[in-house]
Amino acid sequence: MPTAFITGCASGFGNLLCKRLLGLGWHVVATDPVIEGLEEDLAPDFATGKRLLVLKMDLANPPSIRSAVYEALEWSPVDVLVNNGGYAVFGTQEEADLIAIEKMFAVNVFGALHVTKALLPTLRERQGTVVNISSLAGRMSFPESGFYAATKHAVEAISEALFEETCTFGVKVRVIEPGSFDTLFGWRAKEMSEPRRDDSPYADVFPLWDKRKQASLEKPQKPALVVDAIVASLSDPRPFFRVQVGPDSERIVGLRDAIDHDAWVVLMARRNGMFHATSGPNDVMTPPEVLSYGVTGPDDVFAATTTAWNYGHLGHWDETDEGQAALHVLVQRAMPTVEAAPPAMVSPDVLAMAMALSDPKRLAEAANAAAEAVSKLTGHTVPGLAVEAAATLQAAKATRKKAGPKPKTPKSAKAE
């Protein structure tokens, strides 16, 4: 069975991935800065433990990386590298602790580079696979997430170049882009980030940023979904691809790729507090601009706005009357145009049905079906129609038809 070298295995995606691969019969090198109890957690039985090597490795410490890689290769050649270890530091660019930011880059970017560099000779020889855990933040950023997003943007760029450099040797690369998942990520980010200050120049806009971010992201999803995506990617024959995991990642990255990249940034800025800028030709419009064009506005002008609406990124418009009116315009524009119906004609099928219903039995069946449908819909019992009653109705109708119209009573007779 193949061997996987995985970083960041004490918790989250890395921990679950180790357990999944061990369960599938793989050999696994599990690394983490804190490994106390990790072997017992990952391999509770002796047979599984024989296929597991747990190594202490600090991604911020290159000598630690070299030592772990050397020991791993002495144990088994490596077929798959999963660069999973990393964390986030959040903060505005005016207020964040840049020393903490440098440490994050040392782990998220340079740590992954050191591990990849050390294992590439083996991966080239074995036509192995590199799985880099990025994020939807590798394709976009929220306020206060710029530094973390920069590390993941770097991972994306490094992944592309790595594949271009090693593809002739048969090395495959996968980039995994999760959205919001139920791991220790958020807790650790809070621990590593400076708390917001009450006297911050951004204090008034913090609540809006939080509201928009929560509206964009899903509630934390099950980490097993990411592990499923990683494992599936290992058997995928494609040499390079990205995988968005979670509906929030699919939705956000989908719109980011579907419209002009600068238009995406302007849209995000408007969602997060910018209300004064005029739209450019490729931008998502504001509600007043949508209303100024109306339902009959040209499709090319509405293209980016319609796309953003289709991806579910204009929900915040519902917060104002003007925004609601603009959303109504988009709904009307999306409604299919109904062509005028041709003059009504009685088809042979309709004539056949009418003739069939002249039969009392068929008439009773149709009436009973209609009565049953109405009863289910309203919850009230509606009487049906017996065949005998249908026959009586048919006979009465025929008698009235033969007798002709009832003569009108003269007004003088009514007076008497």
Image: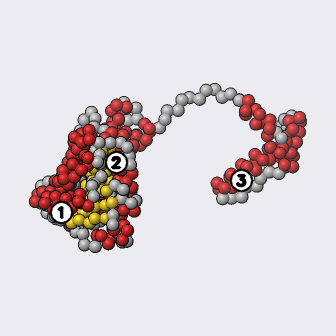
The kind of residue tagged 3 is: Glu
| Rendered image quadrant of residue 165 | top left
In the foreground, 218 or 152: 152
For the residues labelled 3 and 2, the Cα–Cα distance comes to 50 Å
Residue at 68% across, 27% down: 345
Residues at marks 1 and 2 touching, judged by CB atoms closer than 8 Å: no
| Rendered image quadrant of residue 107 | bottom left
The kind of residue tagged 1 is: Asp
User: Where 395 falls versus 122 (above or below)?
Assistant: above
Task: Name the element at disc 2.
Answer: strand
Is there any visible trace of residue 280 in the rendered image? yes
Q: Residues within 10 Å of mark 3 (few under 14, many from 20)?
A: some
Q: Earlier in the sequence, mark 3 or mark 2?
A: 2
Task: Name the element at disc 1.
Answer: loop
Query: Mark 2 — residue?
Result: 243
- Quadrant in which the C terminus appears: top right
Q: Residue furthest front?
A: 74
- Quadrant in which the N terminus appears: bottom left
Query: Mark 1 — residue?
Result: 58
User: Where 121 falls versus 38 (above or below)?
Assistant: above
Q: Earlier in the sequence, mark 1 or mark 2?
A: 1
Query: Mark 3 — residue?
Result: 372
- x and y percentages locating residue 318 in the rendered image: 37, 50
In the foreground, 190 or 303: 190
For the residues labelled 1 and 2, the Cα–Cα distance comes to 27 Å
